[in-house]
Image (tube, helix red, strand yellow):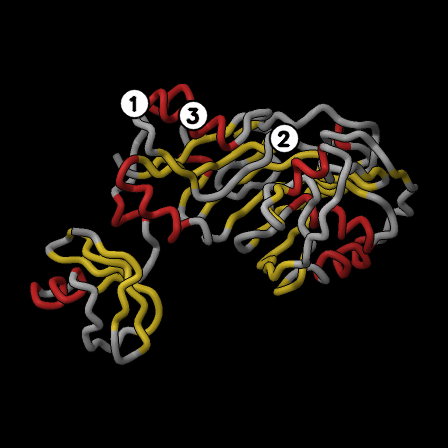
Amino acid sequence: MPVIAADKPLHLTSHDVVNRARRALGTKRVGHTGTLDPLATGVVVLCVDDSTKLVQFMEHDTKEYLAWVSLGAGTPTLDAEGPVEAQGRWQRAEGEELQRTLQQFVGPQKQIPPQYSAIQVGGQRAYAVARAGGQLDLPARDVEIHALELLGVYHRVQDAPRTFDPQSWTPAAEGLTFPLPEPLGEYPTLLLRAHVGSGTYLRSLARDLGAALGVPAHLSGLVRTRAGRYSLRDAVSLDDLAGAPVTPDLDALDFPRIEADERLARELRQGKRPAHPQRGRAVVTLHGALVAVVDGDGEQLRVVRAWA
């Protein structure tokens, strides 16, 4: 059983999705390639049975989101779980000024993760410490935001669009309609489309964007529209997992391919480093079957993982 793109509903954790998949597919071997918070919806990519070997290669895929950022209210969780712990009035910026502020967040940068996150420091989960009333010193991490587009500015999140064209992910009269968490109040809200690298927290982006605009802020809604090569428009509901279309392991890996001969395949499976001009990560196949994922330095191939 290979790879499935599932549509995570509101209020479920990614672990809940994995448990539902285990029951629906009759196996305990299910992993996912990127956590979604309970108040977020959208694509969670599931790797089943032997395909769990692929998680290490797919969890670093880029991701795309629709994000609703409400300005004027900050929360300890940085999202709509609340409660509101800080407030401030946003002096609405002109369009060009707002665009310039958004562009400050595009590119490689340091980002401090939320206290309410699964990050471990000294064997302690940050969210467990936070829920007990404590706080960990979470170092800033290297992340990259590839693109950040403003789709609209609204007087309150209740007025912001929830229906989108699944081809362009722009607001539309018909298309896919998304539920958002219960609003914490009536706050000015930015609707953003974001393309980010692995490890980027949209909750932290909401916090930092608010700080750049001079007000507390929180993420009042989030939809993951793409994870790697998997689009939300192709994802299945949790009720349809048993009959879901699946992606073979080889097609799930978005790397260049090297078609091997018998000798090269044998050497890679033996863990050797055969000569080859490939630079960077690649998938090696033999007669269309997956042999290995390798890293090439232009002279040799080094096996990252091999398949029998």
At label 2, which amino acid type do we have? Leu
Q: Which residue occupies 86% across, 35% down?
A: 85
Residue farthest along the bottom direction in this orientation: 299
On residue 26, which mark appears?
A: 1
Q: Which residue is mark 3?
A: 19
Classify residue 29 as left or right of residue 174.
left
Which comes sooner in the sequence, label 2 or label 1?
A: 1
Q: Residue at x 72, y 52 (%)?
A: 137
Corner quadrant of residue 162: top right
Which image quadrant is residue 238 in? Answer: top left
Task: From the viewer's perspective, tell me whether residue 54 is left or right of residue 130.
Answer: left
Which label sits on residue 125? none
User: What is the quadrant of residue 12 in the picture?
Assistant: top right
Question: Which residue sits at x=66%, y=38%?
Answer: 127
Left or right: 220 in relation to 240: right
Q: Which percent across, then down, holds residue 101?
A: 77, 58
Quadrant for the N terminus in the image: top left
Q: Return the disc, 2 or 3, that comes first in the chain's sequence.
A: 3
Horizontal placement of 263 versus 191: left or right? left
Which secondary structure lies at badge 1?
A: loop
Classify 196 as above or below 297: above
Q: Nearer the viewer, mark 2 or mark 1?
A: 1
Please tell me how crowded label 3 is: few (under 14), some (14-19), or many (20+) other residues with Cα within 10 Å.
Answer: some
Q: Which mark is residue 39?
A: 2
Determine the residue located farthest toward the left in the rendered image.
Answer: 262
Figure check: 232 above or below 281 = above
Q: Are marks 2 and 3 in contact (CB under 8 Å)?
A: no
User: CA separation, marks 2 and 1?
Assistant: 27 Å
Q: Nearer the viewer, residue 26 or 166?
A: 26
Circle 2 SS class = loop
Residue 282: image x %, image y %? Answer: 29, 63
Indicate the amino acid at tag 3: Asn
